[in-house]
Image (tube, rainbow, N blue to C red):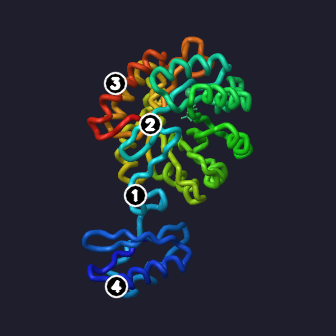
Amino acid sequence: MLVVMNQNATEEQIQNVARVIESKGFISRISVGEIRTVISAIGTKHIDERDFELLSGVAEVIKLKTNYKLTAREFQNEDTIVEVNGVKFGGKYTGLIAGPCAVESYDQVDKTAEELKKSNLKILRGGAYKPRTSPYAFQGMGEEGLKILRSVADNHGMAIATEIMDISQIEKFMKYVDIFQVGARNMQNFNLLKELGKIHKPVILKRGLSSTYEEWLMSAEYIMSGGNGQIILCERGIRTFETYTRNTLDLAAIPVIKKLSHLPIIVDPSHGTGLRDKVEPMSRAAIAAGCDGLIIEVHYNPDCAMCDGAQSLYPSQYDALYNEIKQIAPIVGKEIL
Ligand code: PEP
Ligand code: MN
């Protein structure tokens, strides 16, 4: 709910409205505009706007149509910037994350990280717990995989992003992981989201395979309402009638989410297309559309990858792409650190 004050409302009247908002269990945020002051009531309880309409100094009370609140642009006009290992996502910054689909061995992660370091990579990705369609497919190395990621990343001065699948893994992840990734299949695992709201580490929230923008933001709301505002949304392609590409990468999500929310949005062109030769053009397009970052699968030898080799770039391709997007980003007012 937004309370719009009269043009000549006094400071006392403004403070009184804020007090009443807080007395009803909401957080109040005062935005002083050039002409009017607007006070937002932030919270998830039901609120009766009539309680405010008659308070002195109030011009209008606006009930928001959206169900998401804390993640909405209305509540926070300035962009949220998530920073990890000197890399920033959001505002004028574009962050990069790259690495293999899955952790396969120490050697594989180390060789890949060594290559990526040449392209100035600061955040390494890699799945230790893999959500696979088939129960017979490689499920990931588990905790051993987390240890490998941590040790390789430490050796190269990198941070790590890796997928968490279950609440029971949170404690382990706290020991090893810098960025918790919630995969597309878990976007509506509400119990997991609630628990991630209690931690103090950034969360990448991937868009569900068939989720609308509103459903996606509602999932982010679960994390944020628990107290964790360090959320990075990730567009990774959705299911459509088209089967040529693995998914249909919805780049319109970038301007849409930026309008609806203050949270940073990054793009995963690897899962979004499923084909290595489509990753480079879609990355360029995502940067041109103003995304706040990219997460890209890279393997030192994709032909031998245990998982998603066809969509993984060769390190030389990543390096070429890195040099291209560094030139594109400033055209749309963004900076790649
Ligand atoms: C991944 O990034 O490794 C992954 C499984 O992605 P998604 O959840 O988007 O399918
Ligand atoms: Mn993958």
Residue 329 in the image, given as x and y percentages of width and height: 32, 34
Quadrant (top left, top right, bottom left, bottom right) of the C terminus: top left
Of helix, strand and loop, which one carries label 2?
strand
CA gap, disc 4 and disc 1: 25 Å
Under mark 2, the amino acid is Gly
Quadrant in the picture for residue 251: top left
Pointer 3: what residue?
A: 324
The answer to whether residue 207 is above or below residue 102 is below
The answer to whether residue 299 is above or below residue 168 is above
The answer to whether mark 3 and mark 1 are in CB contact below 8 A is: no
Structural crowding at the residue carrying mark 3, measured as other residues with C-alpha within 10 Å and reported as few (<14), some (14–19) or many (≥20): some
Under mark 4, the amino acid is Gly
Of helix, strand and loop, which one carries label 3?
helix
Pointer 2: what residue?
A: 95
The answer to whether mark 3 and mark 4 are in CB contact below 8 A is: no
Label 1, ligand 1: CB separation under 8 Å: no
CA gap, disc 1 and disc 2: 21 Å
CA gap, disc 3 and disc 4: 54 Å
Structural crowding at the residue carrying mark 4, measured as other residues with C-alpha within 10 Å and reported as few (<14), some (14–19) or many (≥20): many
N-terminal of the pair, mark 1 or mark 2, is 1
Q: At 73% from the left edge and 40% from the top edge, which residue is drawn?
A: 172
Structural crowding at the residue carrying mark 1, measured as other residues with C-alpha within 10 Å and reported as few (<14), some (14–19) or many (≥20): some
Residue 318 in the image, given as x and y percentages of width and height: 44, 21
Pointer 4: what residue?
A: 57
- Taking depth in this image into account, of 167 and 253 the one nearest to the observer is 167
